[in-house]
Amino acid sequence: MQVIIFTDLDGSLLNHADYSFTEAMPALARIKSSGIPLIMTTSKTRREVESLQLEMGVWEPFIVENGGGVFFPSGYRRLSIGDGQQRDGYALVALGTGYSRVREFLGKASGRFHLRGFGDMAPAEIAERTGLPIDRAALAKEREFTEPFILLRPDEIGPLSGMAEAEGFAVTRGGRFHHLMGNKQDKGKAVRMVRDIFRRNSGTALTTIGLGDSENDLAMLAQVDVPVLIPRPGKGHLDVRLPGMILANKTGAKGWNDVVQKLLNEQSGTPWEQDHQREDL
Ligand SMILES: [Mg+2]
């Protein structure tokens, strides 16, 4: 039995307020030394994930923009990906709609609803709304599939979602923003695709663990063997329960660390091979 971990970032592996992962470092070190694939599964962009992976010393496939794109580094564990397209050193499987189409819809919707997307904001405004440093805020604007937005009148969410649905889009909610995306994508579909690629290539049984804190994580949590719900600061756990769900006791990186450590203590069996490290680092 081999383990794969899928994880949300903001509010899960990273603290909601300060984006720190320091308190998750003990569990991260164990994951890395055991060669366990840690698949970041996030609403963030590819550029943001690349920057975080470098900081954490992680080199693994990842899922960006709420399942819009699945990126496998070229040559990763010698896996055969199937029908991915090659892009910038990755095999990419795109489940999402192109960003220009998403922006086009948002432009139309802004005639009826009071909303502002990342494409309407300068990096300074995104930095202010998120608490991200300005260079990270700029990376958050480099979008490929989806658009985070704020709704200035919260009661418009129903009619806006209806209009989105009628035109082939969907709206979901993360820790800070609503997200507009194509209706063929979500974190769950992307997780299933990654799991199936590992399964096809390894031929052994896999246990999947998933960790998240928000509504946009539910499709991911529904796809994994061990769903873990992280509480949100001041708001507690999302009011959803799935079979076998583990509720973390603490918010953010600390809660993430404690649950992962406990699950790894309970795991035994086939270790992963240690042959997939990036050679140019
Ligand atoms: Mg989150």
Image (cartoon, rainbow, N blue to C red):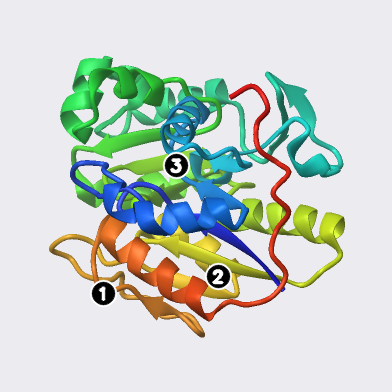
Tell me the residue that label 1 is attached to: 249
Residue farthest along the bottom direction in this orientation = 243
Q: Residue 43 shows which numbered tag?
A: 3
Task: Give the CA distance from mark 2 to mark 1.
Answer: 20 Å
Q: Amino acid at mark 3?
A: Ser
Q: Quadrant of the N terminus?
A: bottom right
Q: Earlier in the sequence, mark 2 or mark 1?
A: 2
Q: Is residue 251 above or below residue 145?
A: below
For the residue labelled by badge 2, is the local secondary structure a helix, a strand or a loop? helix
Q: CA distance from mark 2 to mark 3?
A: 17 Å
- Write the residue at 54% across / 61% down: 220
Which residue occupies 53% across, 62% down?
A: 219
240 left or right of 104? left
Q: Which mark is residue 222?
A: 2
Look at the image and tell me whether residue 12 can be seen: no
User: Which label lies toward us, 2 or 1?
Assistant: 1
Q: Position of residue 235 (x, y in %)?
A: 17, 65
For the C terminus, give its image quadrant: top right
